[in-house]
Image (cartoon, grey):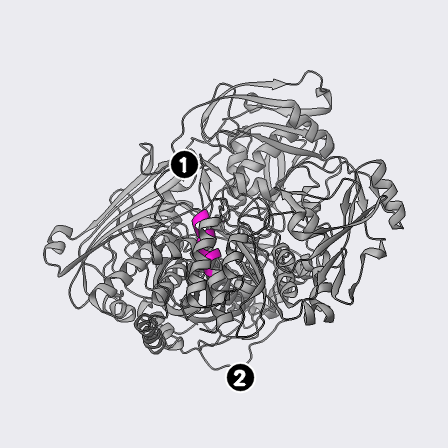
Amino acid sequence: MPAEPPVASPATLADAYALIQREPHTPIAGGTDLMVRITGELGSIPERIVDLARLDDLRGISLERSAVAIGALSSYTDIRRSAICREHLPALVEAAATVGAAQIQNRGTLGGNIANASPAGDTLPVLIAMDAAIVVGSVRGERTIPADDFWTGYRTTALAPDELILRIRVPLVPGRETRFRKVGTRRAQAISKVVAAVSWRDHGRSSGWTQVRVAYGSMAPTPIRVRQVEAILEGAHPTPETADKAAAMLAATLQPIDDVRSTADYRRMVAARVLHRILRDAGGW
Amino acid sequence: MTLRPDSSHGPTTAVPTRPVPDALVVTPGRTVPGRARTVVPLRREGPAKLTGEARYADDLIFPGAWFGATIRSTVAHGRFRELEKDGSFDWSQVVVVTAADIPGDNIVASIKADQPVLVPIGGEIQHHAEPLVLVAALDRETLRAARSALRPIVDKLPGIFDPLDSQHVFAEYTISNGDVDTGFAGADLIVEGEYRVGHQEQLYIENNAMIAVPRDNGGITVTGSLQCPYYVHAALRRALALTDRQAVVVQAETGGGFGGKEEYPSIIALHAALLALKAGRPVRMIYDRHEDIAATTKRHPAVVRHRTGVMRDGTLVAQDIEVVMDGGAYCTLTPVVLSRGALHSGGPYRCPNVRIDARATRTNTPPNGAFRGFGAPQVEFAAETHLNRIAEALGLSPLEIRRRNVYRVGDETPTGQILRESVAGEEVLERAAEAAEFERIRERTARARAERVGSGTVPQGRLVTGTARTASGIGLALAWHGAGFTGSGEVKLASVASVQLTGDGRIQILIASTEMGQGTRTIFPQMVSAELGVDIDDVEIVDPDTSIVPDSGPTVASRTAMVVGGLCIKAARRLRAAVEERHPGRTFAESYKEDARAHGATRIDQQFEPYPGIEFDDATYRGDAYPAFGWAACVAEVDVDLDTGEVSVRDVVAVDDIGTVIHPILAEGQVEGGTLQAVGYATIEEIKVEDGRYLNDRLATYLIPTSLDAPRITSILVEAPFSGAPHGAKGVGELPMDVGAPAVVAAIHDAVGVWIRDLPATPERILAAIYGEPVREAAS
């Protein structure tokens, strides 16, 4: 193994900000993505590492007036066990339960999933579908980046080199429903072939759905929102005709690729069928 | 401590053709559905493994040892023009080995002398993971630096990757019985089919690892993770030009093998030894998972074509079978794998007219080799899937067509072998069907399928869903597995096993048969103590070390319990007789300690003797291909997700006739493990190859089932003892691997109505089979 990169463990957020402002550092939280790179075989080894473990400001899940705030250091297990998440964000709990297996869920964090920026990150479509905001901070202060704007390209983010992800704010929207589905090669320890999250507000029989969000992972270089499909569903009811149209539009819009895990054809087809199933269930037909 | 049998368990209800030998300490497990559990000895090495005290190769400390590494080709086919060495690197701190440093033949001793230990400068590279240069250094950092300072210059050549295209034939066999043309002429129906299977990785839990230590006599001691100490021994002798005594091979605690540590350890041992000899110090060659998957052997991919003539009532009248296996770049064990594949390719069915053509060819991919089942799982997947398709064509139940054709005592196999005894195909079939309620559940799944189709609840297009989310199916398969080595293999091997009473009154078993998780170290003391009438804890088993133990042959081919176990039982009987003769009226147990004091050591070396009446002609492929066969039936139940094509193998009933059961818990462990490995083979395990390179050569991308993917497995052991072995055992390691995949594929068909003829039956293939390939838009 090559020489290990130096690791700094700031005790306060101010120290951490100052440190990464001087020189860029790769943050480490659970290490589940970073440690597989540490041999240098898979990508470059980080030059400097900042350990976030002592930054308690980044911990905790709390209920604010109209949002849930999830500290970036919250593990998937924390999310699964959180009464707040279970009550208000069941789709995120469901997504957290599909990440890796128990050991990964104990170590891996939501902030890490966001920062790692894998197009297959299991929680990312859920964050997009729920209009989550990523709160980041630096010596310059805090700013909020909508999840939909956060992943800017293949494994790149809107995060500046001197910024840290602090927490994730998920707005609580009355009447919002969110559905999640992951399709992997096996039932645990699998990177998704297709991952979907769909949310909408249902105002009852007369008016159609509003605030529809359709988000997918493993379909493009980043997790994506599929606005063409949202447009079909916005103001509509989940009828068979609407579902067929939405599924067809989804398949026509997505441009997935063949890779070692699956094929473009399968991904496109299954993405459409997963959406169709969600709409079928919602419509009760 | 000796654990005695639990008398509350009833006697076996199997089909013994003769009584189970009463010399065994334990009674076999109950052969009823559910968990057969009889109190039996604990695994000898179990507590150490459980507590983490067991030391595997990489845990062993060798003072002064350097770390070794292999520099491999990065092209599938080419010429190794030269080795560039970075002039700025300090070469005095490392050792570099090329083919020029090999003192003996640059050959990895195997069936054919075609595989070099290292490709020489100017030599031809045959696969992308082929070793070119070795390097060792004091620490890993220096090793890394040295690796990047060595640059092999390779001229790329075009490669051959399709075994059907390759003109280089490693082996071919023709087996013929009766006259297929006459058979086809009289058939009511002829069914044809082509079936394909890909690579499978053994994925033992411990990666390959070897440590070589130079000896004062100019020789070398190699300690490592391996199945066959004497294979490694032969390889060291040949390439390093060593005498028997100069080459010593010791097995470390080994974390699984499945055939994957049958042949490749020879190469790693040679590499470690070459570096150690040149460095004059111990060298550790420890593979990480990526190197292990990328470079070491896999199960042979195969293409199997069947043309079968059948009567309306399901009776088979002609089988014309072509088997083509992909051997990879070098011969290794391919001829033997192919031989077993050819011999098993018809399935366990009587057919008067058979022709089997089998060949294995070379491709520019890493050599394929031994893997649990050894050629049989590939061909039995094809045979069973084909038979299920025939049953469907005739409107017969998969159970019924097997009842009509399964071998019974007195039947003749394609090699002209008359099955005289220990034929339990029908027994395992009926018991599996009964335990799984096959016909009842099949009626239910057929009804559900008809309802789905009739009511339009199945999706009507590629992009939409139906009301039904999942479909359930049940599938059945039957298999046979020749016990021990093929043909005259055991006779040629002439294995020796020893049991000795030492001068200080200890009882020792000396064999080269290795423990790799399957129970060797437990069942041998069990068998020998039973014969001698002593407590099991009074019998020691000596660790495999070629300077101490005789060559009892490789630990492969499910031969250990049957063949080597038989030798040890015979040796123990002779030892007991010798001691008791010296102490009339007293048992061995009463007299052996005194005997040792009075008479010194008594050692019995027992050599393999041909099984009476078993003869095979390697030239004509006629005769008794195996002394006996194990028989297995498997019923699998699956749920197929109709939206995604994902398959959940929910329940498996596995019924295996393994002859006399020695240790029911270990035997069931083999059935459960083999079944799960077969489920992986059937559903998700796949090596994707591009230009001769494995694309998914890491654990992140080569996936096997997790515990969440494992079905509930009901294992039922049936005992049809083989009279040629003193204890009647036939072996269990491979049998369950042969039968799981076709059962799962049949269940998928039962659920969704499509036959998947290429393994694995991935969701991608299943959806494509149901809905067809997408219509491509016109190129714009």
Residue at (53% x, 49% y) in the render? A219
Which numbered circle lies on residue B8? Answer: 2
Say whether residue B11 is left or right of residue B131: left
- Is most of the magenta stretch helix, strand or loop? helix
Residue B420 on image: x %, y % = 28, 64
Q: Given the image, what chain letter belongs to the residue carrying mark 1?
A: B
Residue B465 on image: x %, y % = 42, 64
Seen in the picture, residue A203 relative to B46 is either above or below; the reply is below
Asked if marks 2 and 1 fall on the same chain, the answer is yes
User: Mark 2, mark 1: which one is toward the viewer?
Assistant: 1
Which numbered circle lies on residue B331? Answer: 1
Q: Give the Cα separation between the discs numbered 2 and 1.
A: 52 Å
What is the magenta range?
A: A262-273
Disc 2 packing (10 Å; few <14; some 14–19; many ≥20): few
Disc 1 packing (10 Å; few <14; some 14–19; many ≥20): many
Seen in the picture, residue B84 relative to A219 is either above or below; the reply is above
Snapshot quadrant of residue B84: top right
Along the line of sight, the residue nearer the viewer: B235 or B174: B174
Name the residue furthest top: B87
Snapshot quadrant of residue B209: top right
